[in-house]
Image: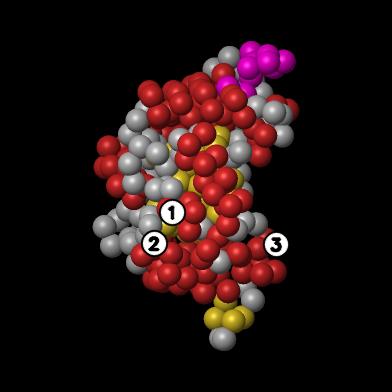
Amino acid sequence: MPGGFHARLQRAWEVSDSALCVGLDPDLNRMPEPLDGRPDAIERFCIDIVDATADLVCAFKPQIAYFAAHGAEDQLERICTHIRDNHSDVVLILDAKRGDIGSTAEQYAREAFNRYGADAVTVNPYLGTDSIEPFLAAGGGVIALCRTSNPGGDELQMLEVEGEPLYIRVARMVAQRWAPLGDCGVVVGATYPRELARVRAEVGSLPILVPGVGAQGGSAADAVTSGADATGRGVIINSSRAILYAGSGAEYAEAARRVAITTRDDCRS
């Protein structure tokens, strides 16, 4: 992995002057017409989106399921290599939501940081501290699911634990137990701005990955207002489908860029 996650992210914020992250979720059913049916459609689509938006973002976040479901992990490797080689100031977050223990977690860490060269990987905190130690020992960053943007997240995340919701306990665990071990962050959905503000109060200056902007209805401006740290940064505002599928014809990359500019400017506002 090319340097520590926090240092890389700080530089990305400074170079881009942007909190925007573009999620790479390539759906073969939504490929633009010029790529429809091509064996390399996933790779070509993602690289075109990356090149069209790289100067507007602090991070790219490929979601591994969209690649693995089609046996396209080799295409994901080449996309990650392209990002590192051609847009080296942009942080690479592997959205894999891993969660396991011992030697299995070590293999997931090797996958994220050695195979794909990610700066950080999303993880499920349910298995506790020992499940993320192999990731941090490998020198990579971990971003723990905390208050997710899906409605079903309430079933566990809002459970009361000694008078406070479980997601607050997760945020405190990451800030107090995990952060001394390495570079950490948390995930909080843009659809819950009040909870986002509560998490910011718990985690201090740790970065917060904020999905749910765009297609899921979250507001980029509200997410920054609720989640920014004392320096005015601290958030990684992710938008995936609204940017990726802004156009379906030959100008799909240009259409993605236009929506990315609007979303970046919403973050700045």
Residue 220 visible from this viewpoint = no
Image coordinates for residue 189, horizontal then vertical, percent:
54, 57
Q: Is residue 227 above or below residue 51?
A: below
Residue at the spot of label 3: 152
Residue at the spot of label 1: 136
Q: Is residue 8 left or right of residue 78?
A: left
Residue at the spot of label 2: 181
Element under disc 3 = helix
**Which residue corresponds to the image point at 65% horizontal and 27% vertical from the top-left?**
72
Q: In the picture, residue 223 is in which quadrant?
A: bottom left
- What's drawn in magenta, residue-wise? 34-43
Q: Is residue 211 left or right of residue 39?
A: left
Image coordinates for residue 165, horizontal then vertical, percent:
57, 76
Which amino acid type corresponds to the residue marked 3 in the rendered image? Gly
**Which residue corresponds to the image point at 60% horizontal and 58% vertical from the top-left?**
101
- Front label number (1 vs 3): 1
Q: Foreground residue, 110 or 252?
A: 110
